[in-house]
Image (cartoon, rainbow, N blue to C red):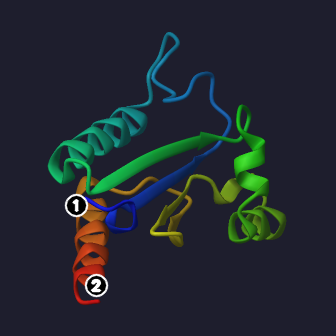
Amino acid sequence: MPESAVVKVEIFDPPMCCPTGICGPTIDPVLLDIQEALLKIQKQFDGAASVERYLLSQQPARFMQNPEILALLKKEGTGILPITAVGGEVIKTKSYPTFQELNQWIAARRKNHDQF
């Protein structure tokens, strides 16, 4: 599959103790849900979708390199996190997407790409 046909999903996470937030003595079920959803998306789209997660505390450059993310952070502060971008477009803020949302967004972008 050509690189340009791959739908890129990016999640800009708030500061956490580890890349997934699934660590420590108590695990937030929301973080388990998003990790499971991302794994299912990668399996379902098998190379047609890529998923990247960026932690503010560990990868601040990723936040600064994206003008839209940087503008949202400057305007709203870290309370706007997590931010989900699909195909370079911010789709959701302040909470993680569900598997169903991710599935719909990726499928719609793949359909739009196939029309060109």
| The N terminus, quarter of image | bottom left
Q: Which amino acid type corresponds to the residue marked 2 in the rendered image?
A: Asn
The disc label shown at residue 4, or none: none
Q: Residue at x 31, y 55 (%)?
A: 49
The disc label shown at residue 112, or none: 2
Q: Mark 1 points at which residue?
A: 100
| The C terminus, quarter of image | bottom left
Q: Nearer the viewer, residue 115 or 26?
A: 115
At mark 1, the secondary structure is helix
For discs 1 and 2, the disc positioned in front in the rendered view:
2
In the rendered image, which quarter is residue 30 located in?
top left
Tell whether 44 sits left or right of 92.
left
Total numbered labels placed on residues in the image: 2
Q: Which residue lies furthest to the bottom in this view?
A: 116
Q: Which residue lies furthest to the front in this view?
A: 2
Q: Which residue is drawn at 41% across and 48% down?
A: 51
In the rendered image, which quarter is residue 79 located in?
bottom right
Does 77 sit above or below residue 56? below
Could you tell me residue 110's position as x and y percent?
Answer: 26, 73
Alpha-carbon neighbours of circle 2 within 10 Å: few (<14), some, or many (≥20)? few
